[in-house]
Image (cartoon, rainbow, N blue to C red):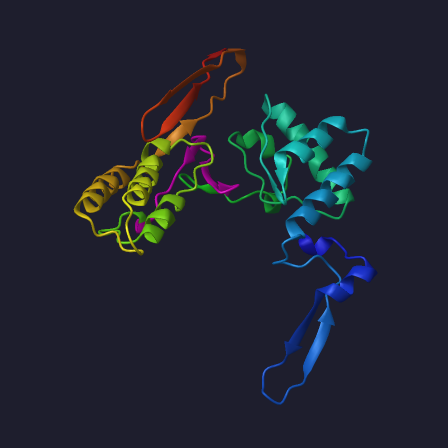
């Protein structure tokens, strides 16, 4: 996507880099980027802003502008529709909109295969029973329409000796929705206990700390590695939102339930 966005000529001098062919005798050459480059801190912002500006210029497609602005992050689109007919229409119009700006949407995937019938096979993501798609950091099984959280093997450590390891352990599971908070909060509580114990240096060797560490690892090993969230495919008729919250001396939490009446 970045290579489809051109840099202004006056900005290209700040995007210089050195290149040397194989061999010590080869001269070092200086090149300039003419397109948005990978690895630059500003590249994601530039890409999103260009796509949004292109969508706004197509002012007659108001609904598509909303989808591009709110449901697209850099080159990933995650959105939903009420039925397969609306989805097919959205896929066609969004593809045409992006193509008019020099961008090509690929690897389409949907929990309803009929929504992608009008797309050529090369534009669809390969399907497979049990295959997981990664969207915005989350793993999604489109066949069962479940979000999956894969616990890395490194989480099941036999010993956690340092505070740095504990912080790293707590950050290994990407869970922006908080579905695994009852498990991930244990690692945070352990780090909190180590910090309040006035430990010196990086080593956590106190008996109470190790006891807390064992309890924390037990919770990690019991952390489920299966589907946790399912989205209903039926047409929703009535929706209610129920929110509950509670706190203890070490942590606080909240949970929201969305009871849905379906046809």
Q: Nearer the viewer, residue 66 or 193?
A: 193
Examine the image and state in which quarter residue 181 appears. Answer: top left
| Residue 137 within the segment the image draws in magenta | yes
Q: Nearer the viewer, residue 32 or 204?
A: 204
**Position of residue 153 measured from the top left corner of the image (x, y, whole percent):** 31, 50
Q: Which residues are magenta?
A: 134-154
**Position of residue 227 measured from the top left corner of the image (x, y, whole percent):** 37, 33
Q: Name the residue located 54 percent from the left edge and 33 percent from the top edge.
A: 110
Asked whether, in this view, residue 204 is left or right of residue 1, the answer is left
Number of marks? 0
**Position of residue 107 measured from the top left corner of the image (x, y, whole percent):** 58, 44
**Position of residue 198 measured from the top left corner of the image (x, y, whole percent):** 29, 47
Q: Name the residue located 78 percent from the left edge and 35 percent from the top edge.
A: 56
Examine the image and state in which quarter residue 125 appears. Answer: top right
Asked whether, in this view, residue 7 is left or right of residue 153, the answer is right
| Residue 85 within the segment the image draws in magenta | no
Q: Nearer the viewer, residue 104 or 240?
A: 240
Q: Name the residue located 67 percent from the left edge and 85 percent from the top edge.
A: 27
Q: Name the residue located 63 percent from the left edge and 24 percent from the top edge.
A: 85
In the displayed structure, 117 sits above or below 101; it is above
Q: Nearer the viewer, residue 253 or 3?
A: 253
């Amino acid at each position: 996507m970045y290579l489809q966005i051109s840099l202004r000529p006056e900005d290209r001098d700040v995007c210089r880099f050195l290149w040397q062919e194989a061999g010590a005798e080869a001269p070092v050459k200086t090149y300039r980027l003419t397109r948005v480059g990978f690895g630059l801190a500003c590249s994601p912002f530039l890409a999103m802003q260009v796509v949004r500006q292109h969508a706004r210029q197509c002012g007659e497609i108001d609904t598509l502008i909303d989808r591009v602005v709110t449901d697209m992050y850099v080159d990933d689109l995650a959105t939903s529709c009420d039925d397969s007919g609306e989805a097919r229409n959205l896929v066609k119009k969004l593809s045409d909109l992006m193509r008019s700006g020099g961008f090509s949407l690929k690897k389409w995937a949907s929990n309803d295969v009929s929504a992608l019938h009008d797309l050529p096979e090369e534009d669809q993501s390969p399907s497979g029973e049990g295959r997981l798609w990664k969207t915005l950091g989350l793993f999604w099984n489109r066949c069962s329409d479940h979000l999956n959280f894969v616990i890395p093997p490194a989480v099941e450590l036999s010993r956690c000796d340092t505070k740095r390891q504990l912080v790293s352990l707590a950050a290994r599971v990407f869970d922006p929705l908080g579905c695994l908070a009852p498990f991930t909060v244990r690692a945070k509580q352990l780090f909190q206990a180590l910090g309040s114990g006035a430990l010196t240096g990086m080593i956590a060797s106190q008996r109470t700390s190790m006891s807390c560490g064992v309890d924390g690892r037990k919770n990690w090993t019991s952390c489920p590695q299966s589907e946790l969230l399912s989205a209903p495919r039926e047409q929703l008729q009535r929706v209610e939102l129920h929110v509950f919250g509670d706190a203890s001396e070490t942590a606080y939490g909240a949970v929201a339930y969305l009871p849905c009446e379906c046809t």
